Image (cartoon, rainbow, N blue to C red):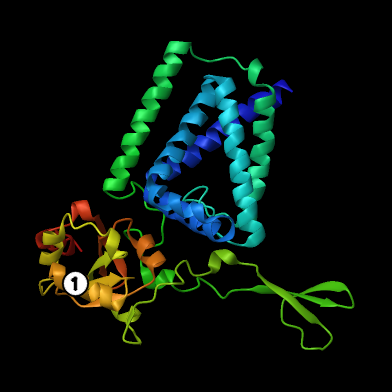
Amino acid sequence: MKILKEFARYAVGALFIFSGIIKVNDPVGTAIKLEEYFQVFASDIAPFFEWFVPAALFLSVVLSVLEVVLGIALIIGFKMKQTSWILLAMIVFFTFLTFYSAYFNKVTDCGCFGDAIKLTPWQSFYKDIILLVLIGVIFWKRDSYSSLLNRKVGIISVGAATIVLVVVAIIAIQHLPYIDFRAYKVGNHLPTLMQNSEPLKYVYIMEKDGETYEFETYPSEGGYEYVEAKLTNPDAAAKITDLNVWRDDTDYTEELLTGTKLVIIIHQIEKTSLKKIDRLRNLTFKNPRFTTWILTSSGYEKFEAFRHTNQLAAPYFFADATVLKTMVRSNPGVVLIKDGEVLAKWHFNDTPLTDDVIEILNRQ
């Protein structure tokens, strides 16, 4: 039991630290995931969950920092009674969350490890069940753990970690994630990621006379009832499947990925920051080195009014809101793409000058 007790302590502590740091790296991404949960719960359980949507970013920072701090407190044995109670409450809540997502197929990616490690809803639930067992051991043996540091040093360590993590999270919000785990990160060639790396292979699950059968090719003989098709080489599937750019019923996706495009991304114009609007406006002036496009998920009439009010003269096109939020964690944000390769990305607080863009192009 002693070995299990110590294993639980260090395994859970390390996992919480890792998971929390991934989220602190990208608080905006975690906030987007929380908004998804709140909207689902508001629709399925109670409307009051909508009240939490405006607080999603604040809650993202709190929960992300809390994960890391709890992991540190657990490993150093700091205030184990309080730590074990908070851990138990969190894991019970998250186990319910992941079960609900998996069983009702509501949120297909829990965001447990941000964009660094993708888990299916059921994988997330099984992970939480294992954590629930380990945290149950910690809670049961909470009085038998000894602290690795004295009380004063423990308070200083946990307090300092909290302050540092909050600052790190705020910087990530005001700029961009320190590490970009998404398919649209700088250096990626988008057309390549929009294709399968090899032909996809499936196993067909069929039923006949109450028996279940698996076939590598769809059975030609009759009598079988189709159940499902399972992808056997998911790693070969395209990493980008939802990038579509359109206007007036015309698809401009291929044109976006041809030539040099400076893309200004504006979604949810009600939440768009106008802090650097003068710099954005300057980027819309014609330039021989690049073409400026604006991508938005807002409706035509709303964006027309917004564009005229802020004198944004560049041509604009429409794309899915989730795709735009994935491309850059900023509203507005700027992305430089040359022949499909992402060369640079900027948060609106770091909106570049035309000279900055040209300097990057000169290095190519």
265 lies above or below 255:
above
Using the image as rendered, state which of residue 303 and residue 357 is in the foreground: 303
95 lies above or below 184:
above
| Amino acid type for the residue under numbered disc 1 | Arg
53 lies above or below 80:
below
Task: Single out the residue that lies furthest toward the right.
Answer: 209
Q: What element carries label 1?
A: helix
Using the image as rendered, state which of residue 60 and residue 11 is in the foreground: 60
Using the image as rendered, state which of residue 173 and residue 257 is in the foreground: 173
Question: From this viewpoint, is residue 245 visible?
Answer: yes
Give the residue at x 19% y 58%: 274
Quick one: quadrant of the C terminus? bottom left
Question: From this viewpoint, is residue 259 visible?
Answer: no
Q: In which quarter of the image is residue 136?
A: top right
91 lies above or below 253:
above
Give the residue at x 17% y 54%: 275
Q: How crowded is mark 1: few (under 14 residues within 10 Å), some or many (20 or more)?
A: some
**Residue 322 x/y as whole percent:** 41, 65
What residue does disc 1 label? 307
Give the residue at x 83% y 72%: 212
Drawn side of residue 322 relative to residue 358, left or right: right
Using the image as rendered, state which of residue 354 and residue 249 is in the foreground: 249
Give the residue at x 14% y 74%: 313
The total of numbered circles placed on residues is 1
**Residue 107 x/y as whole percent:** 55, 59
Drawn side of residue 115 relative to residue 275, left or right: right
**Residue 238 x/y as whole percent:** 49, 70
